[in-house]
Amino acid sequence: MFKYVVLFASVVMLVSSETYSTENDDIDIEGVVNDVNNLKAFINCFNDKGECNEAAADFKNDLGEAFETACLKCTEAQKHIFKRFLDEAKVKLPEEYAYFLQKYDSEGKYIEPLKNAIASF
């Protein structure tokens, strides 16, 4: 029995320490959010309304889970990227942002925990 408890605890620790791919953690998010056309390209990708470049496609793969888990698997860099994206998209692209929220959080139950989780980044 003890072996099973230790095995279970090890699996839980492994899963909880897992993060999303760090491949695009060095993206120039300020360059993205300060160029409205670039920002629009990202949000259109996320909203299935435009083509995705490699970085946007990578982020898009994790968006649903990131919303549902309040970015539990996000690295610090990803939390910063997500925060900057949300902050700027809300102001610069309000219609696309509203569609984005509807797509990933149709019931409005994930956005506040997500915002709280990334607030300090």
Image (spheres, rainbow, N blue to C red):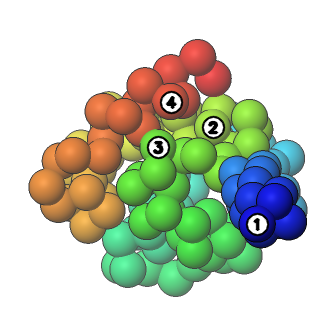
Precedes in sequence: disc 1 or disc 2: 1
For residue 76, side relative to residue 48 (left or right):
right
Q: Foreground mark, 1 or 4?
A: 1
Q: Which residue is mark 2?
A: 79
Q: Foreground mark, 4 or 2?
A: 4
Residue 113 coordinates in the image, percent (x, y): 36, 34
Count all numbered tags in the image, as a single digit.
Answer: 4
Q: Amino acid at mark 3?
A: Ala
For residue 103, side relative to residue 87 (left or right):
left
Q: Are the residues tagged 4 and 3 within 8 Å (C-beta)?
A: yes
Q: Could you tell me which secondary element the residue under label 2 belongs to?
A: helix
Residue depicted at x 50% and y 21%: 119
Q: Which residue is mark 3?
A: 70
Residue depicted at x 47% and y 73%: 45
Q: Could you tell me which secondary element the residue under label 4 belongs to?
A: helix
Precedes in sequence: disc 3 or disc 1: 1
Is there any visible trace of residue 87 in the rendered image?
yes
Q: Are the residues tagged 1 and 2 within 8 Å (C-beta)?
A: no
| Res. 117 mark | 4
